[in-house]
Protein backbone atom coordinates (compact mmCIF):
# COMPACT_ATOMS: atom_id res chain seq x y z
CA UNK A 1 0.00 0.00 0.00
CA UNK A 2 1.43 3.39 -0.93
CA UNK A 3 0.58 5.22 2.29
CA UNK A 4 2.97 2.93 4.21
CA UNK A 5 5.86 3.24 1.77
CA UNK A 6 8.54 5.72 2.74
CA UNK A 7 11.42 7.18 0.79
CA UNK A 8 14.80 5.68 1.62
CA UNK A 9 16.11 9.26 1.59
CA UNK A 10 14.22 9.91 4.84
CA UNK A 11 15.70 9.10 8.23
CA UNK A 12 14.19 6.28 10.25
CA UNK A 13 14.56 5.81 13.98
CA UNK A 14 15.05 2.06 13.41
CA UNK A 15 18.09 2.53 11.18
CA UNK A 16 19.66 5.73 12.57
CA UNK A 17 22.31 6.65 15.05
CA UNK A 18 23.49 10.08 16.23
CA UNK A 19 27.11 11.18 16.46
CA UNK A 20 28.03 14.39 18.32
CA UNK A 21 31.56 15.48 17.42
CA UNK A 22 33.80 17.60 19.66
CA UNK A 23 31.39 20.10 21.23
CA UNK A 24 33.93 20.98 23.92
CA UNK A 25 34.18 23.83 26.41
CA UNK A 26 37.35 25.52 25.13
CA UNK A 27 36.55 24.95 21.47
CA UNK A 28 32.92 26.07 21.38
CA UNK A 29 33.73 29.55 22.72
CA UNK A 30 35.39 30.59 19.46
CA UNK A 31 32.76 29.22 17.07
CA UNK A 32 30.14 31.11 15.07
CA UNK A 33 26.61 30.64 16.43
CA UNK A 34 28.00 28.64 19.35
CA UNK A 35 24.87 28.85 21.50
CA UNK A 36 22.47 27.92 18.69
CA UNK A 37 24.69 25.04 17.55
CA UNK A 38 24.99 23.66 21.08
CA UNK A 39 21.24 23.96 21.57
CA UNK A 40 20.57 22.15 18.28
CA UNK A 41 22.88 19.33 19.39
CA UNK A 42 21.05 19.14 22.73
CA UNK A 43 17.68 18.86 21.00
CA UNK A 44 19.02 16.11 18.74
CA UNK A 45 20.33 14.24 21.80
CA UNK A 46 17.05 14.58 23.69
CA UNK A 47 15.05 13.38 20.69
CA UNK A 48 17.39 10.44 20.15
CA UNK A 49 16.97 9.42 23.80
CA UNK A 50 13.15 9.65 23.61
CA UNK A 51 13.06 7.68 20.35
CA UNK A 52 15.60 5.02 21.37
CA UNK A 53 18.25 6.04 18.85
CA UNK A 54 21.84 5.13 19.82
CA UNK A 55 24.17 8.09 20.36
CA UNK A 56 27.91 8.51 20.46
CA UNK A 57 30.12 11.50 21.16
CA UNK A 58 33.77 12.30 20.68
CA UNK A 59 36.22 14.77 22.18
CA UNK A 60 39.24 16.02 20.27
CA UNK A 61 42.31 16.13 22.56
CA UNK A 62 40.22 16.74 25.71
CA UNK A 63 43.26 17.54 27.87
CA UNK A 64 43.86 20.65 25.79
CA UNK A 65 40.37 21.48 24.47
CA UNK A 66 38.30 20.61 27.51
CA UNK A 67 35.40 18.28 28.10
CA UNK A 68 32.07 18.15 26.28
CA UNK A 69 29.92 21.12 27.31
CA UNK A 70 27.69 20.40 30.32
CA UNK A 71 24.37 20.86 28.53
CA UNK A 72 25.29 17.97 26.20
CA UNK A 73 27.29 15.82 28.62
CA UNK A 74 24.14 15.38 30.73
CA UNK A 75 22.58 13.45 27.81
CA UNK A 76 25.61 11.30 26.92
CA UNK A 77 27.57 8.31 28.04
CA UNK A 78 31.29 8.98 28.29
CA UNK A 79 32.56 10.58 25.06
CA UNK A 80 35.40 8.86 23.22
CA UNK A 81 38.69 10.78 23.27
CA UNK A 82 40.45 11.06 19.91
CA UNK A 83 43.44 12.69 18.27
CA UNK A 84 42.56 12.07 14.61
CA UNK A 85 40.26 14.64 13.03
CA UNK A 86 37.93 11.94 11.67
CA UNK A 87 35.93 10.26 14.43
CA UNK A 88 35.55 7.07 12.40
CA UNK A 89 38.71 5.28 13.64
CA UNK A 90 37.54 5.89 17.24
CA UNK A 91 34.04 4.45 16.83
CA UNK A 92 33.88 0.90 18.18
CA UNK A 93 30.53 0.16 16.53
CA UNK A 94 32.18 0.55 13.12
CA UNK A 95 33.80 -2.85 13.64
CA UNK A 96 30.71 -4.54 15.08
CA UNK A 97 27.68 -6.17 13.53
CA UNK A 98 25.59 -3.26 14.85
CA UNK A 99 27.04 -1.02 12.16
CA UNK A 100 25.16 -3.06 9.56
CA UNK A 101 21.79 -2.56 11.24
CA UNK A 102 22.06 1.22 11.57
CA UNK A 103 23.31 2.57 8.25
CA UNK A 104 21.99 6.12 8.72
CA UNK A 105 24.25 8.41 10.75
CA UNK A 106 23.32 11.96 11.77
CA UNK A 107 26.53 13.90 12.43
CA UNK A 108 26.53 17.15 14.42
CA UNK A 109 29.14 19.23 16.25
CA UNK A 110 32.30 21.15 15.41
CA UNK A 111 34.18 22.17 13.33
CA UNK A 112 32.29 21.80 10.07
CA UNK A 113 35.38 22.03 7.86
CA UNK A 114 37.68 19.84 9.98
CA UNK A 115 36.35 17.00 12.16
CA UNK A 116 32.80 17.02 10.79
CA UNK A 117 33.97 17.03 7.16
CA UNK A 118 36.54 14.27 7.64
CA UNK A 119 34.16 12.11 9.70
CA UNK A 120 31.34 12.51 7.19
CA UNK A 121 33.51 11.73 4.17
CA UNK A 122 34.92 8.64 5.91
CA UNK A 123 31.40 7.43 6.75
CA UNK A 124 30.17 8.05 3.19
CA UNK A 125 33.20 6.16 1.83
CA UNK A 126 32.19 3.20 4.02
CA UNK A 127 28.67 3.18 2.56
CA UNK A 128 26.78 4.93 5.35
CA UNK A 129 23.82 7.21 4.62
CA UNK A 130 25.04 10.38 6.35
CA UNK A 131 22.85 13.36 7.28
CA UNK A 132 24.36 16.65 8.47
CA UNK A 133 22.05 19.21 10.07
CA UNK A 134 23.58 22.48 8.83
CA UNK A 135 22.29 24.30 11.90
CA UNK A 136 23.87 21.76 14.29
CA UNK A 137 27.42 22.16 12.95
CA UNK A 138 29.63 25.23 12.94
CA UNK A 139 33.12 26.60 12.34
CA UNK A 140 35.05 29.71 13.31
CA UNK A 141 34.55 31.25 9.85
CA UNK A 142 31.40 31.19 7.72
CA UNK A 143 33.29 30.48 4.48
CA UNK A 144 34.85 27.34 5.97
CA UNK A 145 31.41 26.22 7.17
CA UNK A 146 29.70 26.85 3.80
CA UNK A 147 32.42 25.22 1.67
CA UNK A 148 32.49 22.15 3.93
CA UNK A 149 28.70 21.75 3.64
CA UNK A 150 28.98 21.93 -0.15
CA UNK A 151 31.81 19.38 -0.21
CA UNK A 152 29.89 16.94 1.98
CA UNK A 153 26.80 17.30 -0.19
CA UNK A 154 28.84 16.77 -3.36
CA UNK A 155 30.24 13.55 -1.88
CA UNK A 156 26.78 12.16 -1.11
CA UNK A 157 25.90 13.38 2.38
CA UNK A 158 22.43 14.83 2.93
CA UNK A 159 22.46 18.39 4.26
CA UNK A 160 19.41 19.01 6.42
CA UNK A 161 18.33 20.80 9.63
CA UNK A 162 17.93 19.52 13.18
CA UNK A 163 14.17 20.08 13.02
CA UNK A 164 13.85 18.00 9.84
CA UNK A 165 15.83 15.24 11.54
CA UNK A 166 13.46 15.20 14.53
CA UNK A 167 10.32 14.99 12.41
CA UNK A 168 11.80 12.34 10.11
CA UNK A 169 12.73 10.24 13.16
CA UNK A 170 9.23 10.73 14.62
CA UNK A 171 7.55 10.03 11.23
CA UNK A 172 3.93 10.62 12.30
CA UNK A 173 1.86 12.76 14.66
CA UNK A 174 0.34 9.46 15.79
CA UNK A 175 3.66 8.38 17.34
CA UNK A 176 3.50 8.18 21.13
CA UNK A 177 6.61 10.40 21.28
CA UNK A 178 5.17 13.11 19.01
CA UNK A 179 4.22 15.52 21.80
CA UNK A 180 7.70 15.33 23.30
CA UNK A 181 9.32 15.86 19.91
CA UNK A 182 6.96 18.73 19.17
CA UNK A 183 7.86 20.39 22.49
CA UNK A 184 11.57 20.11 21.63
CA UNK A 185 10.88 21.94 18.38
CA UNK A 186 8.90 24.83 19.83
CA UNK A 187 10.78 25.43 23.09
CA UNK A 188 12.96 28.49 23.40
CA UNK A 189 16.69 27.96 23.14
CA UNK A 190 18.41 27.22 26.43
CA UNK A 191 21.71 29.00 27.06
CA UNK A 192 24.66 26.65 27.50
CA UNK A 193 25.69 25.91 31.08
Image (cartoon, grey):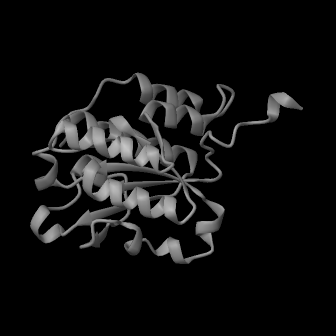
Quadrant in the picture for residue 46: top left
Q: Residue at x 47, y 51 (%)?
A: 155
Where in the figure is residue 84, as x and y percent of width and height?
27, 72
Q: Residue at x 14, y 53 (%)?
A: 27
Q: Residue at x 45, y 43 (%)?
A: 153
Extreme residue in the bottom direction: 95
Q: Position of residue 104 (x, y in %)?
A: 57, 53
Above or below: residue 34 compared with residue 91 = above
Q: Nearer the viewer, residue 86 or 3?
A: 86
For the C terminus, which image quadrant? top left
Residue 10 is left or right of residue 131, and the answer is right
In this view, 163 is above or below 97: above
| Nearer to us in this view, 28 or 151 | 151
Query: Which of the image's four quarters has the N terminus?
Result: top right
Question: Which residue is farthest right?
Answer: 1
Q: Is residue 167 left or right of residue 132?
A: right
| Image location of residue 134, percent across then percent down | 36, 37
Amino acid sequence: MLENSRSRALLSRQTSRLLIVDVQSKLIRIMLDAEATTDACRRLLEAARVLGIPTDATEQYPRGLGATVESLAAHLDAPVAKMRFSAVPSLEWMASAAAGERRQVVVAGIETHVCILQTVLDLVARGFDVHVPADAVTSRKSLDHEIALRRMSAEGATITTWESVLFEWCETAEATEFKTISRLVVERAKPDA
